[in-house]
Amino acid sequence: SCAFVAAVRLHPLAKEGAKEGAAAWRAELLYEESDAFLGCDQMDDALFDHFGAKIGASHGTPIKPASRAGWRLLDGCERLRKLLSTLPEAAVSVENLVDGCDVPLKLARDDFVALLAPLLAKLGAMTRRALSTAGLERLASVELAGGGTRIPAVQEAVTQALLESAAGAAVGGLEDRRFGAKLDDASLAVGAALVAKRAVDAAGPAAGAGATTAGEAGAAAAAGEAEAADAAHGSALGAEALAVCVAAEAEMAGRDAAAAARSAAVNELEGYILEARGMRSRKHGSLIDGASLEPMLDEAEDWLYSDAGEAAGCGELGAFLAALRVRVDGTMVAFREKVEAERVASEAALQASADAAAAERAANGEDEDHDQRRLKYPDRLRMVQKNKDEGTELFKGAVDVTQYRQAAARYNKALTHAAKFVDLSPDAREEVDALKLSLHLNIAMCWLKITDATNHLDQAIRSCTDALALDGENVKALYRRATALEQKKDYEAAKADLAAAAQIAPDDKAVPKLQQRVEAQIKRQLDKEKKMYGKMFG
């Protein structure tokens, strides 16, 4: 991590002097300077010192550099810096930082800039020294490269130095034209020479005669192009022609709606066939009459992809699915009876556990329905952490859905306690919100495991949404919600969550794998629709 500033003059080469395929310019280095102690690492160190002192004062535990907690805090500072490159205020959570508790880091961009003031002053001084190089009369363009240049304060420091120098001010308009945001993998050039070239190419050789600057030339060219486009399009459509177009558009919209409805019916039938095939791999699946089920599903699939199935409308597809459900249910009588019996037993065990917990709460004076005590912050915090730890133990040792339900119950109990804090300071509020975030994420993971509940995916999505309400940039919440959405076959929504997660954490290895799976499902749907449209309009 370092800063590097250079001034380069490009000399055009004569055609006879340039080799084929080589650059047509010769670079002359006028000035260069670097600082190995000026870069993103130093910015992270400034954040580390700030939050390390703050956490040490509030928790009584200093965070030492190069310790396990120190590496966790430094990673959190790096994530916070990246978020502040695009957001006016950002927050991240550092897991298990102090005594097994998650600690939130929250900072406004203005406060971040204040922490970077010494580093920005060094960068500005380096830039000014480069701009004062002898023989550097005016700049044709300015290029920024590197991850740190995405930070607005860094761009502002460079811009200010350019505006204060005669060579930099010649670029023109930098106070109104900021550097772009994607500067780490593709340099962005900002210069009057490029603007002027575009204006001349668009407006012709005579365009520069009436314009005093490249910006005016570009504006004149744009106005000329707009007038020419208006003339080329001619007059508006007449009333009769417009009515024909509106009717044609309505007809196409009707076809689209019919095609979408049929596609939904086909997807429902395909999904049911796929779900029925997977039933035998579930617990007690050996009780299903596979000898009757598999030929039945093969027959249904063959019909769906036959000419008769391709020609079937929504009504026929719905009737076929209803009849198939009845036939499939006939092969699963013993299976469903066993699953129902197990569900009843599980609920009885849960009720017994709830009764025992209620008795325990009553004995400890912790009745959830009547616990309106104004406990001190440390006392209530211990109750939250106690239930959270119990839920984690149950989750780690879970072997079936019963234990996952019990873990979710403990996490929910911890959330109930977390809602009963009173008179919280800003720092305490951040700590409680971090605990709530962790609990919502854990509950979502439990619901993803409780597969025998018909609404388990909806519950997981709700918990992830609650987590995102506390931290809109939380990658775990986005990933787990995308997992539930994928299982619900809402692939577009899953794709949107995964895209957001990939932007926030580009190095996360799990996100691309799920993205590939979702993209494959979307492609499969598009291929089916393309085939269906081909038969409709072929």
Image: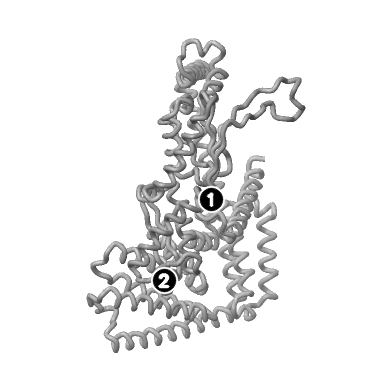
Q: Is residue 456 above or below residue 194?
A: below
What's under tag 1, amino acid-wise? Ala
Q: Which mark is residue 505?
A: none
Q: Are marks 2 and 1 in contact (CB under 8 Å)?
A: no
Residue situated in front as seen by the camera: 227 or 95:
95
Residue situated in front as seen by the camera: 485 or 255:
485
Q: Residue at x 31, y 85 (%)?
A: 361
Q: Is residue 450 above or below residue 270?
A: below
What's under tag 2, amino acid-wise? Val
> How many marks overall?
2
Q: Residue at x 59, y 60 (%)?
A: 509
In the image, is 13 to the left or to the right of 171? right
Residue situated in front as seen by the camera: 108 or 449:
108
In the rendered structure, which disc, 2 or 1, sits on the residue that comes first in sequence? 2
* Residue 64, percent from left and from top: 45, 67
Residue, disc 1:
261
In the image, is 225 to the left or to the right of 427? right
Residue, disc 2:
98
